[in-house]
Image (cartoon, rainbow, N blue to C red):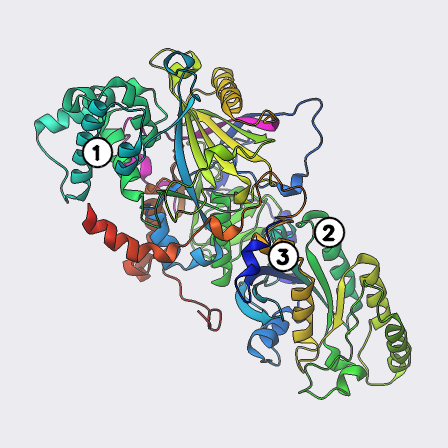
Amino acid sequence: MSESTSANTPKPSSSVKLVLLGEAAVGKSSLVLRFVNNDFQENKEPTIGAAFLTQKCSLPTRTIKFEIWDTAGQERFASLAPMYYRNAQAALVVYDVTKPSSLTKAKHWVAELQRQASPGIVIALVGNKLDLTNDGNETPGESATNDEGATPAGEGEGADGEGQADEEEEEQEATPGDARKVSTQEAGTYAEEEGLLFFETSAKTGVNVVDVFTAIANAIPESSLKSGRGPGAGTGQTTLGGARPAEDSRVNLGERSAATAKEGCAC
Amino acid sequence: MPSTEAQRQRSAYKKPRSGQTELIKPESENFPFEDASVYSPQDAQSLPSRRYTLSLSPQLIYCRSNLLPTLISSKVYRQLEFQAVGSWWIHRSQADSSGDANLYRVPGSREDVFADDKITVKSKRTLMRFLRHIGKTQHDTEPPQGAEEDESMASPFSTYLESKFQVPAELLDPLLSLSLSQASPQKTSAAYAVPRIQRHLASIGVFGPGFGSLLAKWGGGSEICQVGCRALAVGGGIYVLNSGIESIRQPVQGEHDARLKVQLSNGETISTKHVFGSHWDLPTDNHPKCDRVARSISIVSSPLEGLFPVAAEGAPTPAGAVVVFPGTSLGQADDAPPVYVLVHSSETGECPPGQCVLYSSISIAGEAGQSLIEKAVNKLLESAADPNAQVSWSLRYTQLGRSDYDFPGPLAMTLNHVSDNVVCFPPPSLDLSFDDTVIGTVKDAWRLAMGDEVVDDEFMKFEDREGAYDEE
């Protein structure tokens, strides 16, 4: 269709709107803080207001700039949530692996996103606070790129590895001192059924945090990037000329000062 | 959360004490919208509703609007995407066109006038004289004074054009269309039209060649509201949707908490120093008189590409266009008001590719206005090159607000104190372009809320949250 737009530029950059959803205190803001600043705050205050943060994620063929909307628990006003996830291309639905009720809440969010959000939205289910489990304890803090605990669901690949992880899981759950209450298998199976990306993370140690965002970046369909953010823009039967590249219609307000000065003395 | 829960339960059982001031929202609900009806053809396939973002109150934003510096100083513009509104089109009745397309592109700048091949050389000369005149006055700090100018400005714009500049009558409708006046030509005074045409011309080129006004992608004004709510949230505010005010109780003298108690329709009670809202939001019987316009939203099964030409070298592809149907082009008398149609392409994100959205408006509310809108929409679709262009869905409604054709004066823009610390905004403008007076009214409200702490220069200046924009 319109591959000409990206042919000349070496590495196209696209913005991706990503929203965070999940029960209070599961570590939504901490995940973002780890991803954006590689930082962690013990006993972080609940987020007051909402944070809007950006972070670039470099892929081999393109750069994705995440616009991250941290909902600050305000999504508890159910009617408010659509404002957050409208036009979002990705959602991070977070639960706490030590708190079963938070997975129930996460499932509600997934259902709502599937019903209401943009078609084609990439949803990642993330079990946070892995450091409170035995899996997390064994993982050194620096190895943020370690694959342990990552279980990308959906494509059916690595099903064997997943099975093994689950067996380990069952054993570890019995170990004293392990605060885990949600097994990897339970959440992973659910994620696979619903076609979600799935990771277990620790914002505290950094395990898998970058991986979540990289996996999301890779999962965003190229077609939705070409014409800017938006539900399925540029896909489908677009032969009628509606799929012009977004850059063509975008007006940059930053050009005002220069243009205004010129305008002022010209007439 | 638990405390709110407890508070809610307490308030539910609490009976109002006697003797206190309590404003209770009247039973009869009233809204800024009336008489809504949905039309969809019988053979219509159901549309994918999630692919649409429609606006009940669409407005274009002139590049010289004070809204833009406000969006920039508050830094919220970074979460918005702006697109150009390109051409203005005017519909001519068949009689005066010789087989040409019935839509005529209005020359919106001096360059356009030179390039136009429909206007005679003589008319061009008078038109340029007029454009020069208003171009001059717009850069003077003082508008031209004197009894003569005052008098001519009070007369209808048509009289003003003819008597002062000998502009031929055929150019009246195109010039009026640039003013976006929704009144009939006779009722549009020069004092109303001239500054608005000036604004149109002065806005061209501000953000790039070939266009003078903007729209915000993903739904226009509602998208700006959303970004505003976000800025509020980043600042620590909370917003709640789908919940109205049931009643407001003034604090009783000597009461420990001197704040207003606001009972929300979702059952919660909140305490606050001030309440601001429109008279549709607040429990008050004091309803200002509103004007009414007929409006409709139509989803069209064609992109109507011909309406969005790139007007100049290096100009962005417009996502919006304005089509004006003078009353006479719809078979009405000279004194009939025009129908305006704002056309949004799928680039706006409001509809899927291959379609477009028509936002129509006329200052005659009710069935009479709606039938003129329908006529205009049909003519627009007939004049499109695409034989498949059809309305696949439409919503018709009446909108209430303020039309400012006859200069209601500053009172229309002032805040109205319903009771202590309960403040009512005037009805919003029904203008098709963003009404800059809103910003002044909002600033007045902000001053009231800030009280002694107010620092005028800080209005709408927000600091970035630390780390949020490291790379920019």
Q: Secondary structure at mark 3?
A: helix
Q: Nearer the viewer, mark 3 or mark 1?
A: 1
**Image: B114 above or below B219:** above
Chain at tag 2: A
Give the CA separation, mark 2 to mark 3: 16 Å
Find residue A224 and report its image quarter: bottom right
Mark found first going from the N terminus, 2 or 3: 3
The image quarter containing residue B163 is: top left
Q: CA distance from mark 3 to mark 1?
A: 53 Å
Residue type at mark 1 is Leu
Q: Which mark is residue A75?
A: 3
Q: Which residue is mark 2?
A: A114
Which segment is the magenta one? B391-420
CA–CA distance between discs 2 and 1?
Answer: 55 Å
Query: Which residue corresponds to mark 1?
Result: B131
Q: Verify CB contact (< 8 Å) between mark 2 and mark 1.
A: no
**Residue B28 in the image: x percent, y percent?**
55, 29
Q: Nearer the viewer, mark 2 or mark 1?
A: 1
Q: Secondary structure at mark 2?
A: helix
* Three-letter amino acid code at the position of disc 2: Gln
Percent of width and height locating residue B232: 48, 57
User: What label does residue B452 carry, if any?
Assistant: none
Same chain, marks 2 and 1?
no
Q: Amino acid at mark 3?
A: Glu
